Amino acid sequence: MKSKKPKVIHEILGKPMLGYVIDAARSSHSDRISIVIGHGKELIQERFENAEVTFRNQPIGEGEPYGTGFAVMQALDDFQDDDTVLILTGDTPLITAETLEGLADYHERGHFACTILTADMNNPTGYGRIVRNDAADIMAIVEEKDASAKEKIIREINSGIFAFQGKALREALGHLNTDNASGELYLTDVVEYFSQQGERIGGFKLCNNLEIHGINSRDALAKATEYMQRRVNAHYMKEGVTMIAPDTIVIEDGVVIGRDTVIYPGAILQGQTVIGEDCTIYGNTRIVDSVIGDDVTIDNAFIESSHVGDHTTVGPYAHLRPKSNVGCHVKIGNFVEVKNANFGDGSKAGHLAYIGDADVGENVNVGCGVVFVNYDGKNKYRSTVADGAFIGSNANLVAPVTVEKNGYIAAGSTITSDVKADQLAVERAPRRDVDGWVSRKGLK
């Protein structure tokens, strides 16, 4: 896949594809996970530095044999002889924990040296073929480039995912060679070795071939994203979330949504977002790393790294920038922007206001066109507005400034000093009339 970064860190719904493989392995009760890395290893290690995995480096360069078998050899110290070892590929993010559990259980119950996760493909081009004898026993896996014309018509393919008995895998890896079209150490060659040694080889066939959808192009990445989107949204609907046109709704892995919330077309929920119960989210809303309470209505808004309390309405066309803490029973209306501010219970900003670097109390009215003037070109300052205050339309609060409890600010005022409790503040330039000015300027 053409890219400046390693394929396995390309994202699907906000998470690297390799992350889905790690999660599936961990959810299938794998207690140790090793990742063999080569090209772009620094970027992969950086992205998964907190994933509690072991990294093993595959040597790259002239004289190195390459191949899947060579990659697995780098992790020989990471398993014991009596372990069941699962071999997965980092570019198959749709694999599920249920399939891996089924594979491991089938492998262990059958006492196989090796069990292959197989699938029947209508078009097997590009996959290694599963070769069986007349008794239907698996004898070998033949890679596409090494397959004969007869072998190429086989529809049962190797997914690239295996379960091994640890001791058998260790022994078989020692017998690999590069006698093939690519001159590589193929992991698949261990199957023929086991067959020659009389070892039992199992084949665990997939029910849903999409789980082994490999990603080698942007088209394949888009297809995987589409399928994962349907899988994720189906999970939420099963848990009690209503979605109108779910194919248009994007929800990233890790989002939490309460029951009886309704999500309309076009919504995007990202990061570590938590949505409460009985919420309504209308289209073209984007919420990132935010906590939304219960019975909240959000209409075409952008909310990032913020908190919204219960029974509040946000939007349409509002923007809550990071570190905004909006209380309960609040109205944040049309074209209102809040940034790094606390906005108390019962307060409202109906339209066209900027509330930045401020602490606003309860039951405060912020009128149309109000601006919290927080920046002097070098430093930012905070404003404080106490409970019950009223900020008239087109007022400017030049920080740092405090409006005490029940203070009123007249429309059009530019407030540059504190307003006391129960006080009306009017701070406007006096009007000056210049007769005949329009004619003299030639503007009639």
Image: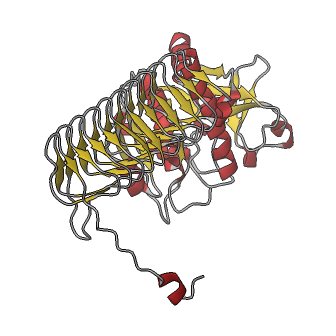
For the point 41% across and 79% down, which residue is it?
Answer: 434
Asked whether residue 321 is in view, the answer is: no
Q: 90 or 172: nearer the eye?
A: 90
Residue 177 x %, y %: 57, 47
For the point 20% across and 60% down, which residue is it?
Answer: 416
For the point 58% across and 19% down, which residue is it?
Answer: 237
Q: 442 above or below 91? A: below
Q: Quadrant of residue 134?
A: top right
Q: 274 above or below 101? A: below
Residue 209 x %, y %: 70, 28
Q: 320 above or below 137? A: below
Q: Is residue 349 left or right of residue 89?
A: left
Residue 41 x %, y %: 41, 55
Give the position of the C terminus as an image quadrant: bottom right
For the point 78% across and 31% down, which residue is it?
Answer: 121
Residue located farthest toward the top when viewing the structure as drawn = 109
Q: Is residue 399 left or right of residue 320?
A: left
Residue located farthest toward the front when viewing the structure as drawn = 435
Q: 371 or 214: nearer the eye?
A: 371
Q: 153 or 195: nearer the eye?
A: 153
Q: Is residue 244 left or right of residue 279?
A: right
Q: 134 above or below 283? A: above
